[in-house]
Image: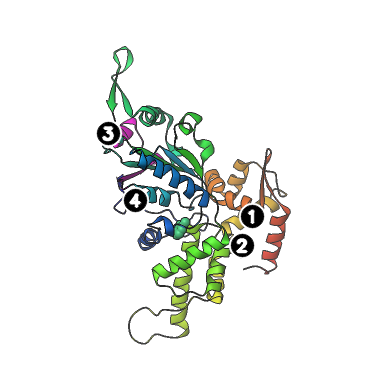
Amino acid sequence: MSSGSKRSRQEKPQEGLSHGNGGEDSFLDQTLRPNVWNDYIGQKNTKENLRILLTAASERKHPPEHLLFYGPPGLGKTTLAHLIAKEIRAQMKVTSGPAIEKVGDLASILTNLSPGDILFVDEIHRLNRAIEEVLYPAMESGVLDIIIGKGPSARTIQLELPAFTLIAATTRIAMISSPLRSRFSGGMFRLEFYTEEEIEKIVLRSAKILGIEIEKEAAKEIAKRSRFTPRTANYLLKRCRDFAQVHTHTKAPRVGVGVKKSRLTKLLVEEALALLGVDEVGLSPADRSLLTVLIEKFGGGPVGLNTLAAALSEEEATIEEVHEPYLLQLGFLERTPRGRAATSKAYGHLKNAKSGKLI
Ligand code: ADE
């Protein structure tokens, strides 16, 4: 766990596009994160609700109530938590569900909070039930119940905690138990996929920060293939920048030192993304092989998630959290009571991809 002012965590690369980001990219992801509300594009409804909640809490001179953000990866849950901390000038401590292994870990985190702190717990669905039980009274009444000893001689002591706000994030809302859900008294906010226009603005903003010269049509093309997700858009932008840089070297050898800068055109973007295997609608090779296996091995489905995962040698969680939300959003996949099924749109898309009409 670390304070929010430092580079506390390595950003997760966008899975499913199988890119292994190095340290530099993680650093850049932090650089691209909006620092002020006005720079945060999209999620209009959530932003407006948060504005009201934060203003009201600040007028009452009270820390905001506990909040839960959920939705597919890369849509800005962590960014929102950072913006809230900044807005209310609170220190933010960052941890995650899998990092809290024992009740003692949580007790230590909670007792080390200062009044008004924000505790950000990412992937809260991976918190184990015994730890959840300790979290309930902490969230509800600001107390920590600690059991000392075992068996008949066990006794409970209660520690008063400083007032704090828990902000949690999850990609798997269904995995959060209903008692835990009900403790998010400030509300649960579902982050939505962005529109292409919003992603285009994010790409143009990121390009400006990174000093990349980019044509509007090139930004549009990246937006089109970004799975309506800012993290993916920024990843694709950086890969296109790399491609353009190297491409410029090979086509026109540099004279002198320094990295040659080139202008990102639509054509360069198309070439760079074709090389990455990202097609016209933003499907990665992994997405396409999911659809191909579903269609060619299972007659288009319906097929159970576990069978599909086994056939793809992929984890069920990765299929559910990374690939499916976007395929569902595109209308390429259906979740039926009997399993996953490919739609006619998926058949059409793969047919075009095979005949070379795509990418
Ligand atoms: N970078 C990542 N998410 C963003 C957002 N919602 N607005 C602006 N820039 C972003």
Q: Nearer the viewer, residue 45 or 168?
A: 45
Give SS at disc 1: helix
Give the mark nearer the N terminus: 1 vs 4: 4
Q: CA distance from mark 1 to mark 3?
A: 45 Å
Q: Residues within 10 Å of mark 3 (few under 14, many from 20)?
A: some
Image location (x, y in percent) of residue 350: 68, 60
Identify the residue position indicated by label 3 in the image.
111
Of helix, strand and loop, which one carries label 2?
A: loop
Q: Which residue is mark 4?
A: 86
The image position of residue 4, as x and y in percent, is: 31, 49
The reply to whether discs 3 and 2 touch (Cβ–Cβ < 8 Å) is no
Mark carried by residue 188: none
**At x 43% / y 30%, what residue is drawn?**
129
Q: CA distance from mark 4 to mark 2?
A: 36 Å
Q: Is residue 288 left or right of residue 186?
A: right
In magenta, the rendered stretch is 89-109
Q: Which mark is residue 330?
A: 1
Image quadrant of ligand 1?
bottom left
Q: Residue furthest front?
A: 59
